[in-house]
Amino acid sequence: VLNAAGVNFAVLADRESCTGDAARRAGNEYLFFEMAKANVETLNEVQPKRIVATCPHCLHTLGKEYGELGGHYDVIHHTQLISELVAARKLDYRLLPGSRSGDDKVTLHDPCYLGRHNNIVAAPRTALKEANIELIEMPRHGKQSFCCGAGGAQMWKEEEHGAGEHAEAVNVNRYREAAATGAKTVAVGCPFCLTMLTDAARTADEGVQVKDIVEIIAERL
């Protein structure tokens, strides 16, 4: 997508490491500070004009938590960049067979750290709608979205299921809500959500695929 839009960008490659978000959410402040300090040292050396994050957890940690360690950066989510590129007419979408038909219906899952914690709800919708995609909202969406089940470092442990015969995993509950909209695809903007809902798709088997928003956009370039 960046190449198609003619964006001048670079990656840290083997100098890139985890932001430490999961360590902090799990309560390991020592590990978080060690990881964060190393990243701040690298980023301050590189001096990026802007950082584009494909993960809302990284977006939040880099943009709102690294400041206490001397890391002050302009950080945006990749859907925000896509929306900017669309507005600047740097992306040329093509109409795919099935567009604006039942085969092209998409529902959007808002990641907690994107909508609820950082109030970014318009950008992912703009990116999808400008690609001529029919967007169907789930009952719980935007800042009132429902978690995929990975939040609070739950990604790294077995989930405690509720009691009762109808109790189900959080990710399965959310996936079924998405499937109930009649959409053929669940669009996500977070690697944690992608993993959790893809796993739920295998469990629930509702025939709804899960893709990152940028995957959907790339298919239309």
Image (tube, rainbow, N blue to C red):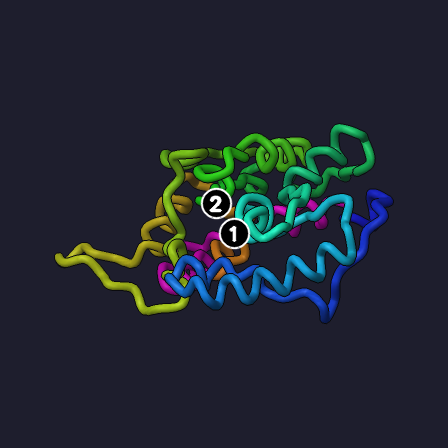
Residue 159 part of the magenta segment: no
Residue at image point 73% right, 44% down: 50
Residue plotted at (47% across, 52% down): 208
Rendered location of residue 207, percent (x, y): 45, 55
Kindly identify the amino acid type of the residue bearing the numbered disc 1: His
Q: Is residue 41 above or below residue 5?
A: below
Whether residues under marks 1 and 2 lie with C-beta atoms below 8 angstroms apart, the answer is: yes
Local secondary structure at mark 1: helix
Residue 208 forms part of the magenta stretch = yes
Q: Of label 1 and label 2, which has the lower sequence position?
A: 1
Residue 126: image quadrant is top right
Front position in the image: 103 or 143: 143
Amino acid type shown at disc 2? Tyr
Q: Residue drawn at (53%, 41%), measured in percent from left and top?
A: 106
Seen as rendered, the residue at the extreme left is 164
**Mark 2: secondary structure:** loop
| Residue carrying label 2 | 113
Q: Residue 43: image x %, image y %? A: 71, 56
According to the picture, the residue beneath numbered tag 1 turns out to be 57
| In the displayed structure image, the side of residue 25 where residue 124 appears, left or right | right
Residue 94 found in image quarter = top right
The magenta segment is: 196-221
Image-based side of 62 in relation to 7, left or right: left
Query: What percent of the width, then of the height, locates residue 100?
Result: 61, 34
